[in-house]
Image: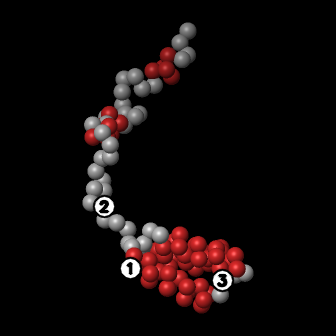
Amino acid sequence: MATFNLDVELLISELSASLTPPQHAAFEAAARAALAAANCSGCGAAYRVLAPLQRGFWDPPDDHRTGQPLGIGSRRPSKLASAEPIGADDPRVGGRDRHRLRV
């Protein structure tokens, strides 16, 4: 039973590592209360209780650059994006099929 408590404490610390300090303390208190109320039998059950609780405390960082190109090579125009789609009408389309049965 002692290893279960150590495993649960480790799980709580891992789940709270990405939280800001005020959220960290609030999550730890809420996690201990949720585990006491749920009466979990193992680490897997504890994780199933704590994972949704942790998502409630976590606020993702603001990303003002969403949708902007990443890296040097992605700032150039792409032939794949600007060209016509593959299979567009072209005089070469079907050439192999037309010449396959020639004698």
| Residue found at x 32% / y 37% | 73
Which quadrant of the figure contains the N terminus?
bottom right
- Report the amino acid beneath label 1: Pro
- Give the number of callouts: 3
Crowdedness of circle 3 by 10 Å Cα count: few (<14), some, many (20+)? some
Q: Is residue 20 left or right of residue 46?
A: left
Work out whether mark 3 precedes mark 2 in sequence or the reverse, and give the earlier one.
3
Q: In the picture, residue 91 is in which quadrant?
A: top left
Q: Position of residue 63 (x, y in %)?
A: 31, 61
Mark 3 residue element: loop
Q: Nearer the viewer, residue 102 or 32?
A: 32
Q: Which mark is residue 40?
A: 3
Q: Which residue is mark 1?
A: 22
| Residue found at x 55% / y 16% | 101
Q: How is the image coloured?
A: secondary structure
Q: Is residue 30 above or below residue 71?
A: below
Q: Nearer the viewer, residue 83 or 66?
A: 66
